[in-house]
Amino acid sequence: MAMESAIAVLEDMEKLSSIGDVSDSNYEVYTRFMKSHRCYDLVPTSSKLVVFDTSLQVKKAFFALVSNGVRAAPLWDSKTQGFVGMLTITDFINILHQYYKSPLVQIYELEEHKIETWREVYLQDSFKPLVSISPNASLYDAVSSLIKNKIHRLPVIDPSTGNTLYILTHKRILKFLKLFISEMPKPDFMSKTLEELNIGTYHNIAVVNKNTPIYVALGIFVEKRVSALPVVDESGRVGDIYSKFDVINLAAEKTYNNLDITVTKALLHRSQYFEGVLKCYKHETLETIINRLVEAEVHRLVVVDDNDVVKGIVSLSDILQALVLTAGGDLSSESEQ
């Protein structure tokens, strides 16, 4: 599989390079690259995929996410014999936020509910079918689906067997593009700045301070539908960042019964080494931003001024939309934090 994909990619590189001298066509070079590759090209020869039955207890499912080092899992319904959704860290956050009372009161719903019960309560009338994609669909279709549906994970499901092969993410797709980006003609917009291209979110940026209780931070995640919160001081300078992924540490350490502790205290228990907040400036080029995101393997950069005061957020979703869907066009109305 890997060899076939590599040969196909190289053949496509030759096609793209052959039109590299036409500057107008360069603007859509990444769009064409995505349209000429299938989701199958990104499926590794071996990878870990965790699947949960909807009859599993919610608490056991979240512990299993932690122990397997994954952020999400497809949900299998034995009654319908099909995949019905995804269980993600967002579900964990929603449960904690909805049912937490105080450190003295156990969260019964987390301890006792099955996944199917939680889905019935949480989804109620807003039930949506699982968004998935065929391995034969183009990467362009995958990017479009991720952004249009405002999701971060897209299961690749084989239509002939009904099996989930892989879970596509913004990060995986951008990393794949970056592998071959040097072989393609470079569009002019790659040398333009974030400010010129208007890529990112620069209004109503959700932040917390070092004394914000976790429960309040969870409420912001739920209400603002953001995936990370810069931790700022009195002057608005960023010193840390609290992301949805950090919340899963509450499950890892079984400390989710006390959400009154501060974000700062919670961040002392990070499971992975933290190198500091990854930042960027509005005057930096799109090419620089992409290199930083891919090399650091992060989901976003905090846009700051010369004093480290938070000015905005640039996400992987913003970047992929700029490269693939709008070819460097203005994204101010579509950005997400």
Image (cartoon, grey):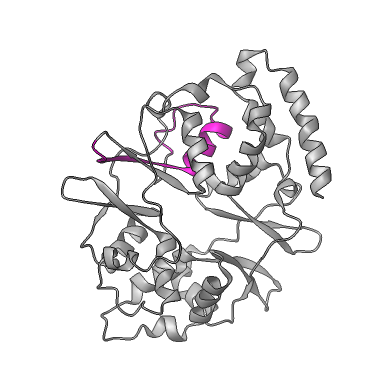
Q: Is residue 60 left or right of residue 161?
A: left
Q: Is residue 163 left or right of residue 100?
A: right
Using the image as rendered, state which of residue 204 and residue 81 is in the foreground.
Answer: 204
Foreground pick, 62 / 265? 265
Residue under the point 39% across and 45% down: 278
Residue sitting nearer the eye, 159 or 80: 159
Which of these two is toward me, 334 or 198?
A: 198
Residue 1 position, x and y percent, is 82, 50
Q: From the viewer's perspective, is residue 176 above or below residue 64? A: above
Instruction: Identify the residue at horizontal 76%, vertical 56% (top origin).
Output: 45
Question: In which quadrant of the rendered view does residue 262 lie?
Answer: bottom left
Q: Splitting the image into 4 quarters, where does residue 212 fall? A: bottom left
Q: Tell me residue 10's x, y (percent).
A: 78, 33
Number of on-image labels: 0
The magenta stretch is 307-334
Please tell me whether residue 324 belongs to the stretch shown in magenta: yes
Q: In the rendered image, which quarter is residue 248 located in?
A: bottom left
Q: Is residue 288 above or below residue 165?
A: above
- From the top left corner, tell me how far across and down residue 40 is, in percent: 75, 49
User: In x, y percent, where is residue 197?
Assistant: 43, 26
- Residue found at the far left of this picture: 234
User: Magenta stretch: residue 259 in it?
Assistant: no
Residue displayed at 34% across by 70% down: 97
**Does residue 334 lie above or below 298 as drawn?**
above
